[in-house]
Image (cartoon, helix red, strand yellow):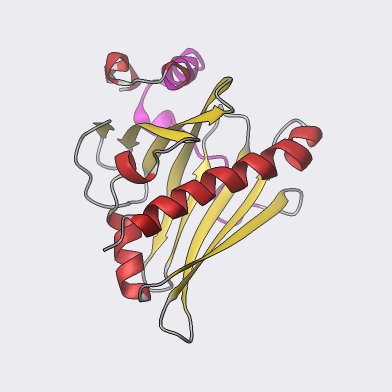
Amino acid sequence: MMKSIALDKIPQKSIRDFIQSQMNNNVHTLDDVKSTYKEGDDLSDHLFHEEIFTISYPISKVWSHYVKANPNEVWNGKMMTFGLMISKNEDEVMYVGEKYSEIKVGQIFYINLNIFGLVKVAVSHEVIAVNPENNYFELSYVEGGKSVGKQRVSFFETAEGHTRVVHTTYYKSDSNFRDKYIYPYFHTKVIGEYHGNMSNSLS
């Protein structure tokens, strides 16, 4: 149940407020948290954003690190902080500082974005696909946030034996100005920090 979430264990007010807003809008159980993208949905009216990162380790090592890295560490920096994770399929809640096993479909991450130190915005993503055979996983924005759509993080081996990480995003909101001028700038900053943390924590 959503009401069983210990709000006092969540450091960020923006995330506490977001979860309270979800509950006020009839999100009572973990299963009531819905992703905004379902497999096969038409994305033709969404905007497209893509960033590419190169990590100097083999793909097997990079993939394993990405799927097992603790959100406390990789979703943490100047632009973002981890708030909590809920797992719809395992009916569990993971708070800041707790252990993490690996990424799984049905996990939902709540992240606080720090915009120039002036505005704090809560965002939430649900893991909707994990495909180790083709080396990608997908996240969807959940209902109740400002954006809808999905993100895919894909991994490719380079000729040098390194790994190219491609972060592709399909997104839209109710503001064309936000989508064209604000979202791309901050999204680039946030995912750059996320992938930088992933790369720096590899050993």
Apparent side of residue 51 relative to residue 6 in the rendered image (left or right): right
At horizontal 31% and vertical 55% (from top left) the residue drawn is 201
Residue 163 in view in this figure: yes
- Where is residue 136? Give x, y as percent: 45, 64
Query: Which region shows up in magenta?
Result: 15-41
Q: Residue furthest left?
A: 99
At horizontal 48% and vertical 47% (from top left) the residue drawn is 193
- Where is residue 130? Give x, y as percent: 39, 59
Residue 172 in view in this figure: no
Was residue 108 drawn as part of the magenta stretch in this picture?
no
Q: Total marks drawn?
A: 0
At horizontal 35% and vertical 58% (from top left) the residue drawn is 66
Apparent side of residue 35 relative to residue 102 in the rendered image (left or right): right
- Where is residue 151? Give x, y as percent: 55, 52
At horizontal 28% and vertical 46% (from top left) the residue drawn is 70
In this rendering, the answer to whether 157 lies above or below 188 is: below
Q: Quadrant of residue 129?
A: bottom left
Apparent side of residue 174 relative to residue 86 in the rendered image (left or right): right
In this rendering, the answer to whether 184 lies above or below 51 is: above
Q: Quadrant of the N terminus?
A: top left
Q: Quadrant of the C terminus?
A: bottom left
- Where is residue 55? Give x, y as percent: 43, 68
Q: Quadrant of residue 20?
A: top left
Q: Residue furthest bottom?
A: 159
Q: Residue furthest right?
A: 177
Was residue 32 drawn as part of the magenta stretch in this picture?
yes
76 and 140: which is toward the camera: 76
In this rendering, the answer to whether 113 lies above or below 165 is: above
